């Protein structure tokens, strides 16, 4: 199922995004310079970041390099290069009045966003089959509270006739500072899930259900994070139990 690809995408985005740079000592606004992610087997991956002021320029580790492009303070393009395979993915972001209305991975998929009167955001993801053909993959709703994404719920559109497949993520947060929130334009990237929130996610609950022939099969998983913080309320270390989604990492250290 495409759920695995979606989860891997979330993980990749969060790991890359959670490593940023530069420090504004006057206002105690921090951006990460580096993270060290340690796996269950003890191997580590170092991720480093470059910036122009508070605009992120690139994120780099041993496996992947990501470049960002800005326009008027908003991120309009993200280019990810897999160093091993040399495969490149380009995501372009389109805005209306400063709000994201489309994220498009060129020749792969599109996600369109609609802003509702109750402060939720509806979205539809379609797969690009050809230049003139798109296929719906899933649609859903994002829920927010106190500038935190608290729920992402969706219904798959590519299931067999008579089958309803639902998927959701629920997020619980601490009251401390998420360093990603200080990156210019980053909080607008709705495809980055909880990484756009003001605070840090302590518990992620993943729910799936399949309704077929009047029989419902459901499952739930819970992922927990614990943090230690510096004197300014930013994370110094994150411990994951179990590793989040398909991640191999059980500990992440943050350096500002």
Image: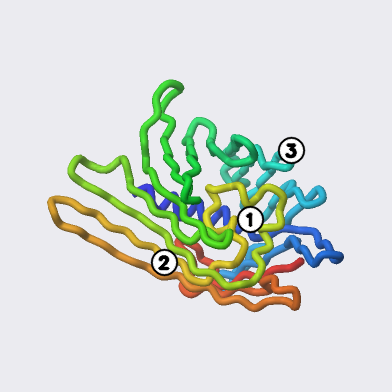
In the image, is residue 5 above or below residue 125? below
Numbered disc in front, either 2 or 3: 3
Earlier residue among tags 2 and 3: 3
In the image, is residue 36 above or below residue 21? below
Residue 72: x, y in percent? Answer: 74, 38
* Residue 212's disc number: none
Q: Is residue 228 left or right of residue 172?
A: right
Q: Characterize the local packing of mark 3: few (<14), some (14-19) or many (20 or more) Cα atoms within 10 angstroms.
A: few
Is residue 40 visible in the rendered image? The answer is no
Residue, disc 1: 17
- Name the quadrant containing residue 153: bottom left
- Mark 2, secondary structure of its residue: strand
Residue 73: x, y in percent? Answer: 73, 42
- Mark 3, secondary structure of its residue: loop
Earlier residue among tags 2 and 1: 1
In this orientation, which residue lies closer to the viewer: 115 or 248? 115
Earlier residue among tags 3 and 1: 1
In this orientation, which residue lies closer to the viewer: 164 or 12? 164
Q: Is residue 244 left or right of residue 89?
A: left
- Mark 1, secondary structure of its residue: helix
- Tags 2 and 3 touching, CB below 8 Å: no
Residue, disc 2: 205
Q: CA–CA distance between discs 2 and 3?
A: 36 Å
- Quadrant holding the C terminus: bottom right
Numbered disc in front, either 2 or 1: 2
* Residue 72's disc number: 3
Is residue 170 visible in the rendered image? The answer is yes
């Amino acid at each position: 199922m495409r759920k695995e690809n979606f989860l891997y995408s979330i993980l990749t985005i969060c790991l890359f995004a959670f490593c940023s740079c530069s420090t504004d000592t006057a206002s105690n606004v921090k951006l990460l310079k580096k993270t060290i992610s340690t796996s269950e087997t003890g191997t580590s991956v170092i991720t480093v970041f470059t910036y122009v002021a508070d605009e992120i320029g690139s994120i780099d580790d041993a496996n992947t390099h990501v470049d960002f492009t800005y326009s008027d303070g908003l991120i309009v393009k993200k280019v990810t290069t897999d160093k091993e395979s040399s495969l490149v993915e380009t995501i372009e972001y389109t805005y209306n009045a400063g709000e994201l209305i489309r994220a498009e991975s060129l020749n792969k998929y599109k996600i369109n966003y609609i802003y509702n009167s109750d402060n939720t955001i509806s979205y539809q993801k379609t797969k690009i089959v050809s230049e003139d053909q798109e296929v719906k993959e899933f649609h859903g709703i994002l829920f927010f509270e106190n500038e935190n994404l608290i729920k992402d719920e969706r219904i798959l559109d590519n299931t067999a006739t008579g089958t309803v497949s639902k998927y959701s993520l629920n997020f619980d947060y601490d009251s401390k500072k998420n360093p990603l929130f200080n990156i210019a334009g980053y909080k607008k990237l709705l495809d980055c899930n909880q990484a756009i929130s003001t605070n840090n996610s302590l518990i992620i609950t993943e729910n799936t259900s399949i309704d077929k022939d009047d029989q419902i099969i459901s499952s739930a998983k819970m992922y927990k994070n614990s943090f230690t913080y510096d004197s300014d309320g930013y994370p110094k270390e994150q411990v994951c139990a179990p590793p989040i989604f398909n991640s191999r990492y059980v500990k992440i250290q943050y350096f500002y």
